[in-house]
Image (cartoon, rainbow, N blue to C red):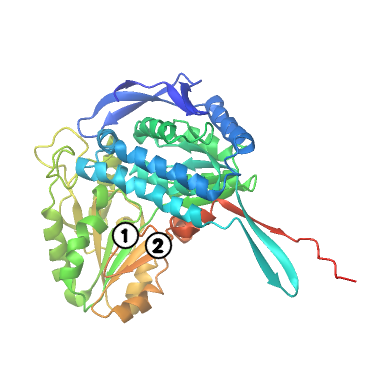
Amino acid sequence: MTGEHTDIYVDGELRPAHSSARIPVVNPADELEFATIPNGDKHDVSAAVDAARAAFRNSGWPQLPPSQRAHYLRRLARAIEDRAEQLGAVVTAQIGMPLVSSVQSNGSGTSKYYRYYAELAGQLEVESERIGHELRTVIRREPVGVAGLIVPWNGPQGAIAWKLAPALAAGCTTVVKPAPEASLDSYLLAEALGEAGIPPGVVNIVFGGRETGALVASHPGVDKVSFTGSTHAGRQVALACAKRFARVTLELGGKSAALLLEDVDLDTFLPLVAPACIPFSGQICHALTRVLAPRARYDEVVEGIANKVAGLVVGHPLNPATQVGPLVAKRQRVRVEEYIASGCVQGAKVVTGGRRPQGLDVGYYLEPTVFRDVDTSMRIAQEEIFGPVVSVIPYHNEEEAIAICNGTTYGLGGAVFTSDPERGMAIARRVEAGVVGINRYALHIDAPFGGVKESGLGRELGPEGLAAFLEIKSIFPAQRSSAV
């Protein structure tokens, strides 16, 4: 999908964007521009929102029985799976995700969300009765309206599916705004939408940068915004929605911690270092970027983590052996390098990594990095880095460990590793985070995901993800006349 792309997807078709401005798409593995996308303006956003509003009012989509909407979702899942290889290749070219992972996560790893919400749609009870205090109430569940879905670049089709699948299941119409770094794959999504027979205007896709996203978030025709991105940007989205009381879901940054208790079996934890602590080069919001280790076992833990990280294969994302590809952009590598320098200046020590790898002079590559002797006051212990950096922090006792876990402005994820699962459960209940694992760390499609504090508002996935796109109406039927 090289070359200049000038279209947006509105009302069931690709049409030229009003904006003549373009955003370059750069391959992070070779630093070469290979495509451009439109930088949508207010006219493009309004066209997409108007199409979504018209579809909400006139297409019959919100009125379809949820079981019929489920059929469309299943067809969309199949259409995405049929494009898995194409989607994987395009995503890899845009963001540097290793190809093997990219094909899986943007193919079957994405289609499962549409199938899951098709299943939930089939179970959705639009109206139910509630009887209490001798009064009958009809509880009605209605789609919230037009939903603006603003998604990040780190796993683009999966991020879209987290939002689009429940929105469609609920009966909403939508405006999707992908990240500029990863927009080309949404042209393939547009193809899949057409193949699945999704009615015109139900899904619209507008491309552009942060300004375009702000236009979507602030548009008076958008009833609900679901945003995934940085805490800074999320704050702006929240303010825009607050001005008109639009519903909003925010999935924001994180500084999640893996708490290793003194009885931890390192053979349980260490295999999770790569997938849990530095997934996709650490460019995942819920990565366990802090590891809390008891002082009595601190050196052992640091050594084990460092050995695992040092053994990871850094390389070109098209190489099947690659485990860690490039960072998404030059600015991202500069940001991570600045944090590494900050950690050194503040007194932490690099155990492994921290440099640009030898033999990879072109591309935004960076060695995965492990810090020891990290104090909780350091920037690397408090701020989201969004790169392959793990900070190992010592603690003296359980109370201090829990305080360190909860001692940031974030509260997205966490995990407790221990040989005593009951003790792990007790600690998990005290961790201020939306998702906590015990001796494991994985997201479940049927479990709600989201954060507390500055990690966001609301939940995605599970039945809660569907509920986020529904409004609840209470109808009080006329009292039945008593027989005379």
Residue depicted at x 42% and y 49%: 162
User: Could you tell which of marks 1 and 2 lies nearer the N-terminus?
Assistant: 1
Q: Which residue is mark 2?
A: 408
Q: Are marks 1 and 2 in contact (CB under 8 Å)?
A: yes
User: In the image, is 395 to the left or to the right of 66?
Assistant: left
Task: Please provide percent x and percent y for residue 80.
Answer: 35, 39
* Kind of residue sitting beneath label 2: Thr
From this view, report whether residue 404 is shown above or below residue 246.
below
Residue depicted at x 37% and y 79%: 426
Residue lying at the far front of the rendered structure: 484
From this view, report whether residue 451 is shown above or below residue 71.
below
Is residue 457 visible from the viewing direction of this image?
A: no
Task: Please provide percent x and percent y for residue 268.
Answer: 19, 69
Task: Write down the quadrant of residue 461 in the picture.
Answer: bottom left
User: In the image, is 133 to the left or to the right of 441?
Assistant: right
Q: Which residue is mark 1?
A: 381
Circle 1: element type: helix
